[in-house]
Amino acid sequence: MLEVERIDSDGELRARPVQPEAADALFPDIYVSPETPNQGALGVGDRVLARLTQRADGSYQASAIRVLDGGGGRLLGRFIADDIGDAGGGRIQPAERRARSDYLVAPEQRGGAVAGELVLAEMLPGRSLGLPRARVSERLGAMDAPRAISLLAIHANFIPTEFSDAALAAAAAAGPPTLGRRTDLRALPLVTIDGVDARDFDDAVWAEADSDPDNPGGWHILVAIADVAHYVRADEALDRDARERGNSVYFPDRVVPMLPEALSNGLCSLRPGEERACLAVHLYLTADGEIRRHEFTRGLMRSAARLNYGQFQKALDGHPDDALKPLMASVVEPLWGAYSALAAARRKRGALELELPEKEVKLAPDGSVERISDAPRYDSHKLIEEFMIAANVAAAQTLEAKQAACVYRVHDQPDPAKLENLREILAGLGLKLSVSRQLSAANFNHILAKAADGPDHHVVSMLVLRAQARAEYSAHNYGHFGLGLKRYAHFTSPIRRYADLLVHRALIAALDLGEGGLAGGGEAEFAEICTHISETERRAVAAERDARERYIAAYLGARLGADFAARISGVARFGVFIELDESGADGLIPARALGGTRPRHDPRRQTLSVGASVLSLGERVVVRLVEADALTGGMIFDLLEVNGKSWQQPRQSDKTRPRAKHGKPAKRGKRGKRK
């Protein structure tokens, strides 16, 4: 017996055994086929008898035999009261899109919930009036409250939000650092460059021309990172809470931090003009951006300025503001020179160059959505990214050279089956991907460059992205395919990623940099921890995506009946997914709304045939919004136009109509029903 536990970041149902003796055991991944025989779609919390088949990667595929009314699952949704009012029962409308039905709540199981309120509930065994039953266990507040959408995403994805009393006390008791054995970096004009709304600044940068005559045109850069290991010691309260979270989670209206605010926004944040403990790396680059050598040090720094990406970009474009004018020669120009060298090295090694716009949800003061727009993407963003990549490479190289334990950030080659599908779809677009078994990121860059100026650029970018393996954390190194690097680790964000904190501890121990390093034998846990933090990262991505989709659905809910330009972004047997040009919002045109006969889905070519018409990935469409639900984040559309032509719903021909005896079409009875 399995219980459907959650939906992962790829939209797949994941399950685990529910036998009592197996409660604390570790199991391989179990993926569940979403349909059940004669019982519709499965949803989170469903318990099923299933047949398991092992897949090539060691995970299992479960095919449900039947759904069991076992109860005990967890349900998140909106409470809808019956007509009796506060004394009566009601039902819960699940927040999960795949949910098969509402859940009935008896009056004595209501728990004081009021109409329209978000609730957590326990699924109960048995059914009443054909509906599954549930008991309200916790009231979360009104659905229309300003912070309700992020609260939904937090609870739906099991994001921990409360720190232990011991962790909060430890964070509050922490004090500012002293110089001691640290290297004094306070005289260097290190600066932080982050988003306008950022509050935790965990990396600072500085650069100068290398004075070594043996390295003409070279650069000396310094990347200084908050020394979180100084405050968060292994197996203490702060560490236990941080490990459970795995990472911070970011929403438009709040952050669920990995560390208490006293550290994440206080002593570990590299605020301008304040002395902060740091772990820094000196990197010496050749003129073409190759790392000649590097050296780690534990230091004490004082940020010279807190800059944002837009502000720094204006300075790069020759329009510095008053804060940056005095820093042009000492800060801006050397940083740009070093970045130019690193960018050249990136191009040379052929790192994957995917530029898909990211949508940004901006909220009004009352918590409503003010606008949805493309997040800006400046050269200043790329500058910081390249500095961080260089520091991460240096961390991995150092630990490997010391034969020390390391949490690698790995990215495998694309799956061969996905590549075959990709080749077939690209061929239909007039693009040819190499048939070599050992592709490099440069092969994909070649395809992206060919499509760059054509109408299919966006869809080709999406296809290439979907063909890639998922990056994850591993105690064993097999390289980073996307970046074109043989070894890579995350070192630069220990305030918000537990992986980086582990790398800091490993460096401190390997280089004898003082207290707070990895304890002897600690590396034995790395494999288990890597599995855990890879999962918490996927959980955070799913929660952030869920919140964004719900915000967009709430925003567009006021425009029901409006028409939008869009493109087909996905094809499934149950309909086509579309992406709106205006907001980047995703929605579904159900197969039932396309008319005609039962559509025929070709998963290899990514097409859906409806009568004589064929809908394909990437086609331009005009759609009409018919449903937008902020509770689930789902949006349903009708199809109006395809590639500039009106969509005429195919009519059933006599060949497809049910036939009576002797080959004659069946007669219709009252209300159009067939006799």
Image: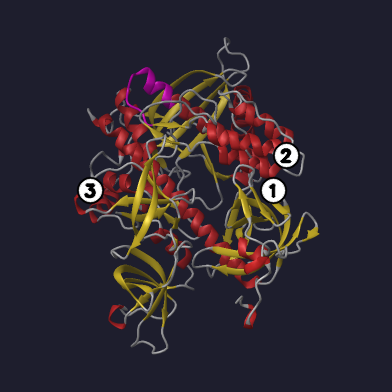
Between the residue at mark 1 and the residue at mark 2, the CA separation in whole angstroms equals: 10 Å
From the image, tell me which residue sits under label 3.
Answer: 24
Q: Determine contact: label 1, label 2, CB under 8 Å.
A: yes
Three-letter code, disc 1: Gly
Q: Is residue 398 magenta?
A: yes
Q: Secondary structure at mark 3?
A: loop
Residue drawn at the location 33% of the way across and 63% of the way down: 74
Inspect the image, locate mark 3, and give the three-letter code of the amino acid beneath it: Asp
Q: Quadrant of the N terminus?
A: bottom left
Residue 341 in percent (x, y) is at 62, 24
Contact (Cβ within 8 Å) of mark 1 with mark 3: no
Q: State the quadrant of the C terminus.
A: bottom right
* Quadrant assignment, res 118: bottom left
Magenta-drawn stretch contains 79: no
Q: Residue at x 30, y 43 (%)?
A: 27
Query: Label 3: how many residues lie within 10 Å, few (<14), some (14-19) or many (20+)?
Result: few
Estimate the x, y position of residue 192 in percent, counting from the top left.
52, 40
Magenta range: 395-407
N-terminal of the pair, mark 1 or mark 2, is 2
Residue 6 pos. (x, y %): 39, 54
* Towards the viewer: 259 or 467: 467
Number of other residues with Cα within 10 Å of mark 1, as a class: few under 14, some 14 to 19, many 20 or more: many
Q: In the rendered view, would you say 50 is above or below 93?
A: above
Residue 420 appears at what percent x and percent y?
A: 59, 34
For mark 2, does the 10 Å Cα neighbourhood hold few (<14), some (14 to 19), or many (20 or more) residues? Answer: few
Q: Which residue position holds label 1?
A: 618
Q: Is residue 343 left or right of residue 44?
A: right
The image's mark for residue 184 is none
Q: Label 2, on which residue?
A: 429
Q: Is residue 474 visible?
A: yes
Residue 534 image-quadrant placement: top left
